[in-house]
Image: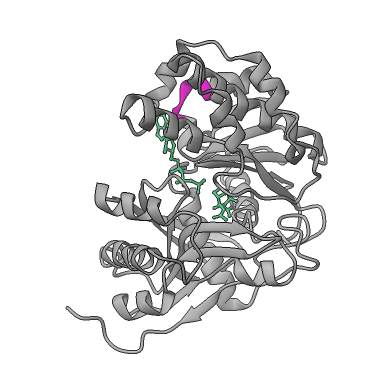
Amino acid sequence: MIRALGMMSGTSLDGVDAAMVETDGIRIGAFGRSAFRAYSDNEAAMLHGALGGWPHDPGVAEAAAISVAAHAALARDFPEAELIGFHGQTLAHDPQGRGTHQAGDGAALADGTGRPVVWDFRAEDVRQGGEGAPLAPFFHWACAEWAMGQGHLPAAPLAFLNLGGVGNITWVDPAAPAPEAEGACLAFDTGPANAPINDLMRQRRRALRDEGGALAAQGQADRAVIANFLRHPYFERPPPKSLDRDAFTGLAAAIRDLADADAAATLVAALAESVAAGFRWLPAPPDRVLVCGGGRHNRTIMAELARLLPCAVQPVEAAGLDGDMLEAQAFAWLAVRVRRGLPTSAPSTTGVPRPACGGRISHPRRRPAR
Ligand SMILES: Nc1ncnc2c1ncn2[C@@H]1O[C@H](COP(=O)(O)OP(=O)(O)OP(=O)(O)O)[C@@H](O)[C@H]1O
Ligand SMILES: CC(=O)N[C@H]1[C@@H]2OC[C@@H](O2)[C@@H](O)[C@@H]1O[C@H](C)C(=O)O
């Protein structure tokens, strides 16, 4: 077993999550400490300004340096980590076009922390014809297997729903022998999640988010906007499939003339309806949906999901897991898989033609400065 630190800064650009996992890259031995470092307003503004950028675009080198410095600062609090999994900041994702871009140089982070760093997890999958995302699904399989072993879950297929900036779902059969085995996982991005809600709150209320879903709870969803949203060709596309943060720009335009609360309620309904629309692709009805990511703190989202989905909807804490740290933990576990040469994606998770091992390993070239 290796003690690995996973670090993730997601599409909502709020900061960096870091979490320890002890694993052999297959089974979870133990979960360890975790921490969060918020981006300062300046850092967040720089990263926001670089969104959509590719490696040589203006502002991208600065964004990458901010990402590395923030991760290095956080990693210093985890001297016990033998290996670091570094996701980097996704600035652009166009797997069927220009590729996928996570800003932040893993070699610089290895130098800055004195630990080997696994990074650039998505590019190889895209190079082989996959979507490069989502990558958490194999870890969801490991979590389901762990939770079953702890007696927190029955031995039945279930789904993990991650509600970050974008939503993604993984259907998992925890009885499958390995995550890359046929029939073990099916995963895809469901649609927009918190990103448009945050954008709305920033533009209209000068707030970072709709705390607890309070604003949305006071509004009425606009059914015409939702009906039109659900006509987007993305929902007709069978999985695997993934989304860029700003793929649904039409939604922001469609709510422009709605009152604040109605606009927020409409975005919540769009999120929940897109998850419900995704259910038709699942191989069998899941026993429950375990929700992770920041969206599970939004009570209006959780209520709308419970109303629309044909099974129980629970925060992942119901299975003994930490919903704020699951993605960071995923990149710790994936880092160990990369180190061992085990696959990190499969046809049923990213559409890559055969199970693939992504990620690069950089070793520190010198001791870190004190
Ligand atoms: N208490 C809360 N009330 C309402 N919304 C919340 C709350 N806490 C978090 N959120 C929402 O969750 C978002 C953060 O979710 P998370 O950290 O899972 O996203 P991410 O990891 O950045 O994104 P992704 O998974 O798409 O890469 C916040 O930006 C906010 O919209
Ligand atoms: C390209 C990219 O960074 N995608 C993220 C994003 O955030 C959620 C969703 O879109 C998912 O596809 C992915 O992150 C998680 C960690 C994943 O790869 O599973």
Along the line of sight, the residue nearer the viewer: 115 or 257:
257
Query: Residue 249: x and y, percent?
Result: 58, 37
Height in image: 263 above or below 158?
A: above
Could you say which quadrant of the image residue 272 lies in?
Answer: top right
Query: Residue 178: x and y, percent?
Result: 72, 61
The answer to whether residue 320 is magenta is no
Q: Is residue 217 left or right of residue 309?
A: left
Query: Residue 326: x and y, percent?
Result: 49, 49
Could you say which quadrant of the image residue 25 lies in?
Answer: bottom right
Residue depicted at x 66% and y 21%? 226
Q: Is residue 271 visible?
A: yes
Placement of the C terminus among the 4 image quadrants: bottom left
Query: Residue 93: x and y, percent?
Result: 59, 57
Residue depicted at x 31% and y 29%? 206
Along the line of sight, the residue nearer the viewer: 257 or 185:
257
Residue depicted at x 55% and y 46%? 245
Q: Which residues are magenta?
A: 297-301
Height in image: 113 above or below 365?
A: above
Residue depicted at x 26% and y 63%? 77
